[in-house]
Image (cartoon, helix red, strand yellow):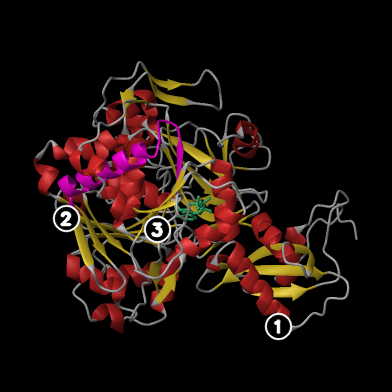
Amino acid sequence: MMSEFGSTLSGLQGEAYYPSAEVIAQANVPDPEALRKEARDNPEAYWAKRASELDWYAKWDKVLDDSNKPFYKWFVGGKTNIVANAIDRHVKSWRRNKLALIWEGEKGDVRTFSYHALAREVCKFSNVLKSMGVTKGDRVTIYMPRIPETVIAMLATAKIGAVHSVVYGGFSVEALHGRIEDSESKVIVTADGGHMNGKVVELKKIVDEALKRTAAPENVVVVKHIGNQINMEAGRDYWYHELMAMPIVRQQQRCETEVMDSEDPLYILYTSGTTGKPKAILHTHGGYQVGIYATFKDVFDIKEEDRWWCTADPGWVTGHSYIVYAPLIAGATSVMYEGAPTFPFPDRWWSIIEKYGVSIMYTTPTAIRGLMRFGAQWPNRHDLTSLRLLGSVGEPINPEAWRWFYKNIGKERCPIMDTWWQTETGMFMIAPMPAMGLKPGSGSRPLPGIEAEVVDEDGKPAKAGDEGFLVLKRPWPAMVRTVYKDPDRFVKTYWSKYPGLYLAGDSCRKDADGYFWIIGRVDDVIKVSGYRLGTAELESALVSHPAVAEAAVIGLPHEIKGVAIYAYAILKANVEANEALVDQLKQHVAHEVGPIAKPERIEFVASLPKTRSGKIMRRVLKSRALGMDEGDLTTLEE
Ligand code: WT7
């Protein structure tokens, strides 16, 4: 059956790449258009079918409850726990002896976990959390380097029905403090430190500093990873390895998985938005597991014998969905690497592919652009023939980086799955499947069951080729359920510009073949090297420095980072503007938010363009910096 756009295996307009007969023959979804049609004809039946591929303690009564829009509910009445699908069902099968995780530290140390071994560690840590009084619904903050214990802590929390809040280990004091406080976490799981690019990231020190600013959670669990000297506060801080060896934990190797309702919370994940206060995106057990599993299987075509490697950090949604949960639900073997791609040399990643026989690699445009700089001689030193599929996420991939990745890493054999999605969507939304034609720079088309559109200011579909707002027209199972503790913000941010449509916050174009081309954010979010930061968060970090009276932050194009942070600051009276202060302010932002948030440039100014109501017009700053027309200035005050 042909879709409204026909098959995408030939005749696409513009630069296009088609999969080989071999790729098509072995694809989990050999006919993407047929699946899209099936899902469009009866979306609920489609999602019910996908949900049936997983285990449920009790089947749902209703696939989708839309009686209280936009607070949609999925698989209502179903009883489940994502860990039952990620771990429990595999240890009951032959997969108990299959490798779930292959981990390599930056220093070269290797640890592996079979499903059986992972299950045991998870059970033990669940019992540790229970011994600390953590029960269903309690929050646990996880602030960790990229090590197996991060995965174990997430699964252990979910297993007992508690809610994890993972804070990316690259965030720093104020970002961590805000997230601990807002989540009211009972326990923090952290490590003495992590290795990154030959340096030590002193996570426990940052935790200590963050906890000075807030009412302390009851317990801090510390994984000994690098063995440095750290402060352990008696009665609050406990070593992970000592807790795991407690008689009560050792004697009781098992822990029952808590039976959850489909709509019970699984995790919150803070993400940046328009205000200085980051919002906690809430995901639940039932729909989320269905959405991430189905998309992982279809887009990355996962097979038993694959070795999957997602280079993200578990601290971002990419890590939650596609390092931890979806690969485990699919019974896959994942590779996880702790450190920097260029340590000690720019071929570290390529050596990992060769060493472990990685067959599918999922990474970011920023990383590709960064590695491209060092030249093809680095990948060329390694045997990359194990690869069969590649993936990209986080920001639009420029065609030049796409072609380099395709040619030098995939050797023109491996299709690139450019996946568009968000912390809020939980799962891939616009992405190709292997048996489709690809266009460099486009994530191709909405996946089966997903309806996306590009609309103009009035919410009407934009003409092919015209830029507009990207919206989602139908609810989907892994969708954000609310903003934790702030349902009004949920409605206002995503569902109020166009009634009934989810506003993604991206600007986009759809071409004549129905392929979507993401242009970039149209709100106050910036994506620096694919990392999501809010201009307001960065501005508040700047004004928290005693020298700064006011600040404005914008994102400007950058060759490697995609977008880089430019800050404008008005200094307090009698403060001298000099280069030393610029450096000091950059360090200050890095200390408060994290090294990724360090501004590329800080400029001192006497005034900032504002509306009459006092809102900074970042758009004007941006146009000025780019030397462009400043557009409509009728609301400008000065
Ligand atoms: C924003 C969401 C989704 C996992 C990591 C990011 C941008 C994401 C793509 C892509 C163009 C992309 C969008 C989106 N984005 N993937 N394939 N092509 N842009 O999650 O931090 O919530 O950021 O990242 O701007 O809205 P996130």
Report whether residue 327 is seen: yes
Relative to 253, say whether 343 is above or below. Answer: below
Q: Is residue 549 magenta?
A: no
Residues at marks 3 and 2 touching, judged by CB atoms closer than 8 Å: no
Residue wearing tag 3? 313
Residue wearing tag 1? 580
Quadrant housing the C terminus: bottom right
Left or right side of 328 for 549: right
From mark 1 to mark 2, how far is it between C-alphas? 59 Å
Residue wearing tag 2? 22
At numbered mark 2, what does the secondary structure look like: helix, strand or loop? helix
The amino acid type found where label 3 is placed reads Asp
**Circle 1 or circle 3, nearest the eye:** 1
Residues at marks 1 and 3 touching, judged by CB atoms closer than 8 Å: no
- Residue lying furthest right: 638
Q: Quadrant of residue 418?
A: bottom left
Q: Nearer the viewer, residue 578 or 365?
A: 578
